[in-house]
Image (cartoon, grey):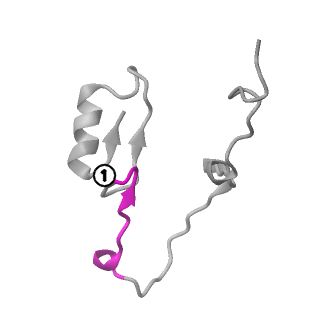
Amino acid sequence: MATNNSPRKQKANPKFFGEGLTFDDVLLQPGYSQVLPRDVNITSHLTKNIRLNVPVLSAAMDTVTEASLAIALDREGGLGI
């Protein structure tokens, strides 16, 4: 029987559940910019010790992330799970 301290009764930490966007919510339009691509840093920290050069993760599904995709993502700075 679940108690009041059970993980099922605890509320989720709001810092992990902010605004969520999907592909339909975002529209990228090309345009002029004074920012040069070489001056942009898109490095992300997955954990304190794991840094991604590009913020790309593949799904943790064997039919999605096979060895070839994981290797390709690694070469570009992403992570295949």
Residue 48, image x and y in percent?
36, 54
- In the rendered image, the residue lying farthest to the top is 1
Tell whether position 48 is magenta. Answer: yes
Q: Callout 1, which amino acid?
A: Asn
Indicate whether residue 50 is drawn in magenta.
Answer: no
Where residue 32 appears, as percent x and y from the top left, is 47, 82
Quarter of the figure that contains the C terminus:
top left
Quadrant containing the N terminus is top right
Above/below status of 79 relative to 63? below
Mark 1 falls on what kind of element? loop
- At a point 65% along the width and 51% down the height, the residue shown is 21
* 77 relative position to 3: left or right: left
In-image side of 31 versus 9 (left or right): left
Q: Residue at x 20, y 47 (%)?
A: 75
Residue beneath the point at 29% across and 34% down: 69
What residue would you read off at disc 1?
A: 49
Q: Relative to 54, does residue 67 appear above or below in the rendering?
A: above
For the stretch drawn in magenta, what is the main secondary structure?
loop
- Give the residues drawn in magenta, as a range: 36-49
The picture quadrant where one finds residue 15 is bottom right
